Image (spheres, rainbow, N blue to C red):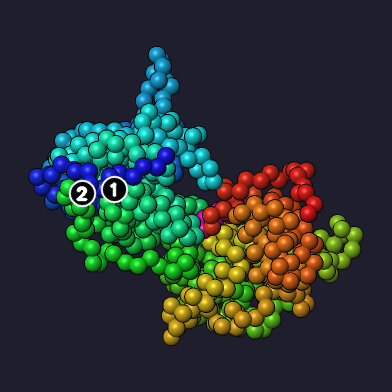
Amino acid sequence: MTKTLNSSKKKPIHIAPLKITLGQFCTDTAHFAGNQARALTFAKQHPDADLLLLPELFLNGYPVDDLLHHPDFIQQNNDALHNLAQQLHAINAPALIIGAAHYETDGADGDDKQCFNALYLLHNGKPQHLYNKYQLPNYGVFDEERHFSKGSEYGTIFEHQGYKIGLMICEDSWYPDGFARLTDMGADIILLPNASPFADAKHKLQRLTRFTQYASDFAVPIVYLNRVGARDDLIFDGASFAINHQGKIILQMPSFTEATATMSLCNTDLTIDNAPPLTHIPNSRLHDIYHAIVMAVKDYARHNGFTKIVLGLSGGIDSALVATIAADAVGGDNLHCLLMPSEFTAKSSIDDAVQCAKNLGAHHHILDIKKLYQHAAKTLAPAVGKPITDGITHENLQARARGMLLMGFSNHQGALLLATSNKSESACGYATLYGDMCGGYAPIQDVYKTDIFALSQWRNQCTPNTPPIPQNIITKPPSAELRANQKDSDSLPDYPILDSILYHMIEEETPHHAIIAMLEKKHIENAPAIVSKVWTMLQNSEYKRKQAPPCPKISLRALGTDRRYPITSYFTVSSP
């Protein structure tokens, strides 16, 4: 449904401007005391505002999954909401809109409770208005139909100081119907609290494009407030913005950092009170991806009680980039890099790894795995009936020897172990369970190899006088170094070709005949065989991915919650 209001339609003239302050903040999962205190501090810092706005489910954190239904969670949620309302009243705070779970008892026995994703307007010591989210996303990473009941109306209006203020929550606002309803009801402005996860190019191509169109079509100012911070696999980038009734962006708040902004609404005119320091040009794609991952690692470590990070630094580009991300997240002095050479590790790889660790100011330890591997191979040989000198078992024993040392160091130091596999490898199963897949978190597992190269170059360019990643790591052919003269290209198509195929298979679900035609148009030989091989690797390695550490979602379709394929399946694709 699309509607354009007549721009000549007269709006009532209001007596005074309405001052609205936004809090683009991080919210901690189920940390009611902390989130309540943060909301109260926000109110104390902005006593001159007329209306304060915080993101979706701010009081609870988002998502909180099945915690929503735990009796203690319900009680803590309700207590925090009541206490916050009283505390705000005690300091004569402005009216506050805050996201929180809302529970309603259904049934005569009172035991059946419905849970809603709600917005509360807190003022004068109690909730003055309540809105329950209407559109519940149930795709990709979202399972809101599992946890929440659907609200009874599409958007809501409340009056405050003579203004009619429209409210919707996140998914409500992705369709025009809610805007049509609220503008028909006379909304002077529409506020949109969100907990919208980051994905590559989502902000520019989806959010800004969609909401500038809606603001123009419905001739109404729109304020989009997003939370910031990371929780497990989800990254919330902030990047809140405001659009005037003509569809012009008048505020773009920063990404990946907390911020506040104040604006004034006078009749239909929305203006920003502190625009110069907050308005900025959206960043580059590589900037956003890199900073998203740094924030994900930093928040994962902080929220789960880790102050130190450990990883295996091989002299390859994946581990070098992860080490750089870790150093940017927690500081080089809190990063431990284990260099674990075998007989197949080139001296240049050790030198590159040592130099990378030194560039980052990280601790590094060289642990030779030759004797450990040889003892494991000798111990296993009687069971398999022959010496283990080559083949996949020979290679994986090396990776698992490294995994054992990494886990041992992690246990001893209480450090978070980061896995270093990328999306290209994870998709194809080109990684070893209980070896290089060991870890509590996998920062780049949703980043294709071609982007690994681009991010490494970009990060070096950020500090050109002190680039963290030695150039030789970026330019040399990728190799797992598990056998003599090994290169990734021995087992995988060249990464530009592989990543293009994987993108179409994973993100786009493109039919194989179309992928083959695309490759043949680029004069790639043996396109049908290459596509078939990649699909087989993708399909056969599902069991590995089910056991992989959590990773931050970067792409529009991550391997995991976004793409839920069964391990055991007889599914085949049609022949081209």
Q: Residue 575 at x, y = what percent?
A: 80, 52
Determine contact: label 2, label 1, CB under 8 Å: yes
User: In this rendering, would 509 be left or right of 529?
Assistant: left
The type of residue carrying mark 2 is Thr
Q: CA distance from mark 2 to mark 1?
A: 9 Å
> From the viewer's perspective, is 366 left or right of 383?
left
Q: Is residue 83 left or right of residue 404?
A: left
Q: Please provide percent x and percent y for residue 207.
A: 41, 54
Which residue is the extreme one toward the right?
385
Residue 181 appears in the rendering? yes
Residue 63 percent coordinates (x, y): 44, 44
Callout 1 secondary element: loop
> Residue 226: in sight, yes or no?
no
Q: Amino acid at mark 1?
A: Ala
Q: Residue at x 74, y 70 (%)?
A: 524
Residue at disc 2, secondary structure: loop
| Residue beneath the point at 42% across and 39% down | 1
In the rendered image, the residue lying farthest to the left is 15
* Residue 168, image quadrant: top left
Q: Residue at x 71, y 45 (%)?
A: 567
Give whichever of 42, 386 is nearer the camera.
42
* Lower sequence index among marks 2 and 1: 1
> Mark 1 sits on what residue?
219
Q: Which residue is mark 2?
A: 268
Taking 302 as reference, is 323 above or below it?
below
512 up-or-down from 183: above or below: below
Q: Which contiguous range is marked in magenta?
A: 547-554
Q: Is residue 550 magenta?
A: yes
User: Where residue 94 appears, x then y in whole percent?
Assistant: 16, 44
Q: Quadrant of residue 569?
A: top right
